[in-house]
Amino acid sequence: MSTPEARLAAYAEAGANYRAIDDLRLRLLALLPLATGTGIFLLVNSGSRGALSLPAGLFGVLATISLFFYELHGVEKCAHFIHRAQQLERDLHVRGAFTGRPHRIAGVVSELLPAAIIYPASLAGWAFVAAYPLDDKILWIPANYLIASATFQVAVITASVFLCVREGARRREWEVEDRLYERGIWPGSAALAGDRDRTTLPR
């Protein structure tokens, strides 16, 4: 087993890595709606329905989807460092910032909720930009508004379901990992990777 000094060093590193990734995620969440709003503002105020709307909108859609994938990767890394820090806090017999961190407010609000709203909203905004030249109406509603609304709804549902499913799967993985960790098998080791493939684990 590692020494208390080594565990403290690993704990400090896990905390620093978590804060760095979380700060980057917050910056992206703040920048994304600003960039989307600026694009829509410039388009609408130009009074033009030119040929640039479609390529600009499609580029925004692809950029938003790419950033959402990056957000998912950041969520996974944050979750990893949170869980690792919690394990180290248990080893050090302290109730630190990670063990005592709040989870959900009213069972719904968590750090994942903004990502499930802001990214779909940005996606809908760029879809509106791409469809802006459309003059057609459906049931007296402009087609570009309907496209943006449908994009937002589909994206919210898809993102929410994916994040919830992934969070549940992650918690099951943590249960397995904690049981292995208690047996002295460290996360990331070859033994852990082998034991994860088993359907049952000795208690």
Image (cartoon, grey):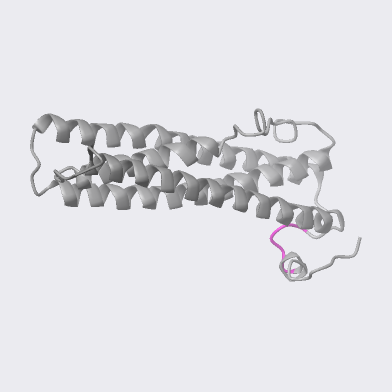
At 12% from the left and 47% from the top, the residue drawn is 52
Magenta segment: does it hold 15?
no
- Please provide percent x and percent y for residue 166: 60, 53
Residue 125 appears in the picture as rendered: yes
Magenta segment: does it hold 188?
yes
Using the image as rendered, state which of residue 146 and residue 110 is in the foreground: 146
Main SS, magenta residues: loop
Q: Which residues are magenta?
A: 186-190
Is 143 left, or right, of 97 in this rendering? Answer: left
Pick the quarter of the image with the N terminus: bottom right
At 48% from the left and 50% from the top, the residue drawn is 158
- Residue furthest to the front in view is 139
At 31% from the left and 53% from the top, the residue drawn is 62
Is 108 left, or right, of 172 in this rendering? Answer: left
Answer with the quarter of the image where residue 173 lies: bottom right
- Please provide percent x and percent y for residue 172: 73, 54
Answer with the quarter of the image where residue 110 lies: top right
Using the image as rendered, state which of residue 31 and residue 8 is in the foreground: 31
- Please provide percent x and percent y for residue 96: 74, 31
- Please provide percent x and percent y for residue 100: 74, 31
Using the image as rendered, state which of residue 184 and residue 46 is in the foreground: 46
Residue 86 lies, with reference to residue 202, above or below; the image says above
